[in-house]
Every structure is written in C-alpha cells, then in structure tokens.
Image (spheres, rainbow, N blue to C red):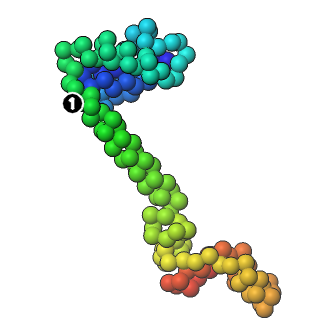
C-alpha cells in the first residue's frame, strides 16, 4: 500500500487522495520510500513514522515546525467536521432533520408532530370496531391533521 507524506507539515496518508496536495497545509505530497514501510501494511508503525519525520521531514528546507505542531489540531477539527457532516447526512436520510425523534413526517400534511400508535391502542380499536378499525396496519398518528398512517 503506497504511503505519501508532506515535507512541510509531516502529514502522512495512505494514498494520494488530494491530487498530490496535503489537506493540512496545501503543500505537495511525496511518496514515502519503501524503507519506511513494509509491503502489505495498511498503517505505518510509530517507529517508522518517527524515522521518516527525522530523516525526511525535519531536514526538508520547507519544513515548518509550527505547522507540524498544529497538524494534529487541524486533523482533529477535520475529523469533527467530517463526523458532523456524516451525522447530518444520516439525520436527513432517517428524517430526523424534520424535527422529531422518529424521523417520520405525515404523508398528508407533512407535519413532523407525530406519535407512534401503541399496540394497546390498535388492539382496543380493533376490539371495538373489528376489521373496520382505521388503526389496523397503521403505525403513526399525526397530531396536526389527525390522520393515521
């Protein structure tokens, strides 16, 4: 698995995902020489990273110690933003962005103020109205328009 590194901030990534530029500082990525990793590895060992930083990154004329020290802070912020975007995408997919915990909206009035029809409620309705009960096969009740769906 090819690894790439940035001579300016020391960022190491598994593949050249950003078209050759570091996502931390925007500098060019360079392939990590094979002496710093072994064929078939998915991650570099800490000792290998340390050796790479000492021999290639910190001796580079474009090395920036401030960027190197801030790299982890930046990557953590990037991770938090990515997690938030994924959570937002999941919420949209599940419908929770509509404002309710169920992620369901009424198909008739599109309100999100809905509640789950309880099993007991369906049983009582079926017991009273029999097969004519409007709650048979319904799972949700809209508190705005009163429909069951």
Q: Residue placed farthest to the top in the image?
A: 35
> Can residue 4 be spotted in the picture?
no
Residue that appears at 23% across and 30% down: 67
* Residue picked out by circle 1: 66
- Residue 4, x across and y down, in percent: 37, 19
Residue that appears at 65% across and 78% down: 117
Q: Residue placed farthest to the left in the image?
A: 61
Rendered image quadrant of residue 27? top left
- Residue 131, x across and y down, in percent: 80, 83
Residue that appears at 77% across and 90% down: 129
Q: Nearer the viewer, residue 137 or 39?
A: 39
Badge 1 marks a residue whose secondary structure is helix
Q: Nearer the viewer, residue 110 or 19?
A: 19
9 relative to 86, above or below: above
Rendered image quadrant of residue 9? top left
Quadrant position of the C terminus in the picture: bottom right
């Amino acid at each position: 698995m090819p690894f790439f590194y940035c001579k300016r901030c020391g960022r190491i990534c598994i593949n050249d995902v950003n078209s050759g530029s570091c996502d931390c500082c925007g500098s060019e990525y360079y392939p990590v020489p094979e002496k710093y990793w072994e064929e078939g590895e998915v991650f570099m060992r800490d000792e290998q990273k340390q050796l790479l930083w000492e021999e290639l990154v910190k001796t580079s004329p474009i090395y920036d110690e401030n960027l190197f020290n801030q790299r982890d802070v930046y990557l953590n912020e990037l991770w938090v933003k990515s997690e938030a975007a994924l959570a937002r995408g999941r919420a949209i997919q599940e419908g929770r962005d509509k404002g309710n915990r169920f992620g369901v909206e009424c198909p008739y009035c599109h309100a999100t103020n809905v509640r789950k029809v309880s099993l007991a409620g369906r049983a009582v309705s079926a017991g009273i109205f029999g097969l004519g009960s409007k709650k048979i096969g319904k799972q949700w009740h809209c508190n705005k328009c009163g429909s069951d769906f």
